[in-house]
Image (spheres, rainbow, N blue to C red):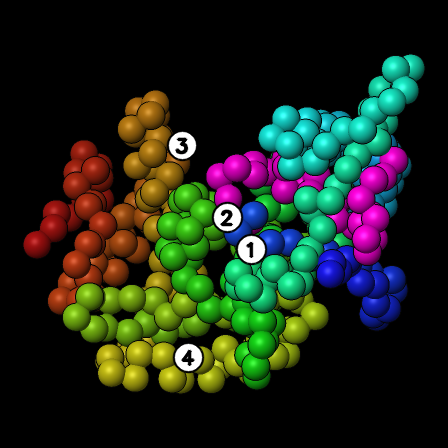
Amino acid sequence: MSSSPFIYSGKEGLKIKVFIKDNIILSDEFDNDMIVTYLGLRQILKNNINNYFVSIGLLSYHLTGKQIASKLVTKSILSGLSKMIEKKIIITNEIDKDRRTNDWILDLSKLQINTDKNKKEKEFYTSIDSKYVSMILNSDMKDKISIVRFYCYLMSTVSKTGKKAGVGFTAYQDMAKSINICRQTISKYMDKLENKKIIHIYKSTDSIVDSKGIREIPNTYGDIDNENKIISVGRSYIENYGNNAKKIKSTKTSKTRSASAKYNILMKDLESTGEIRYNDNELKEIYETLLEYNRKYEKYEKDPKDLSIFSNYDFYKGEK
């Protein structure tokens, strides 16, 4: 028995939920282009039908709502399709030697969802809202192909059942380990998705101190349509997080977060080019903000910022 995406009518009109295997989202076998193409192909699947006429225009339409997508998206679809054919994830059944370029007859049987197999092998799936995929791909973000995959991963981390269904709690550093990209990139992608009103993030202003040192309480997040639930669950989550640890107020205000981000950029610049992109006033603000942070949490923080890189500047006060 197999199943296909289902269509439902919401406040934004007709939308499609696309089901994608969680292990595909995390698989090294599927690169970003293949994920994008997979999302398009899954939208045309029907129960018990394996062979389809597929064109670049058809996939573009399902992914973006346009028959002709941007060059970046078109290139991603073609690349993903080529790789899926090469890996025999999908099979070409071409019988017409004079077929048009970028038109295919494809056997998509391996993309069907076998619910009987799922129960035996305990495979897990995540539903991805096609509307939000389209919003990402139609945006002007240069890294939108990567962000599509990250969005799929993010939706796989939200609770799928129970009272907290639709709300995620995974810490950014844990996300970074799972998908092998740095924490700063995770934070950047989260901010971009929030700015596009695709997700809502309820940000904690507290931290806890335990045997591992000082740690921020992870944010809660999810689909923007669940905003009220995310806020409600997020507040409760913060109250109950780390019951056996000491809770302290924000270790990183927005000012400290900004200084930390600039500090990380500064360190990378010094390592790669040796050039500094900030002026003296900006460097002084970064230094003084992080100096105050180090002093305030010196008994908790096991890895304070090394501020000796500012030692050649007049504002440098030294460290304890």
Can residue 56 be spotted in the picture? Answer: no
- The residue that label 4 is drawn on is 238
Within 10 Å of disc 2 (Cα), the crowding (few <14, some 14-19, many 20+) is: some
Q: Does label 3 or label 4 sit earlier along the sequence?
A: 4
In the displayed structure image, the side of residue 298 where residue 288 appears, left or right? right
Within 10 Å of disc 3 (Cα), the crowding (few <14, some 14-19, many 20+) is: few
- The residue that label 1 is drawn on is 22
* Marks 2 and 1 close (CB-CB < 8 Å): yes
- How far apart in space, not on screen, are marks 4 and 2 (Cα)? 28 Å
Q: Secondary structure at mark 3?
A: loop
Q: Nearer the viewer, residue 27 or 109?
A: 109
Start-end of magenta stretch: 25-53
Q: Does label 3 or label 1 sit earlier along the sequence?
A: 1
- How far apart in space, not on screen, are marks 2 and 3 (Cα)? 35 Å
- The residue that label 3 is drawn on is 277
- How far apart in space, not on screen, are marks 3 and 1 (Cα)? 40 Å
Query: How far across and how far down the image is residue 46, in percent?
Result: 83, 53
* Marks 2 and 3 close (CB-CB < 8 Å): no
Q: Nearer the viewer, residue 153 or 198?
A: 153
Q: Secondary structure at mark 2?
A: helix
Q: Is residue 320 above or below residue 238?
A: above
- Disc number lying in front (2 or 3): 2
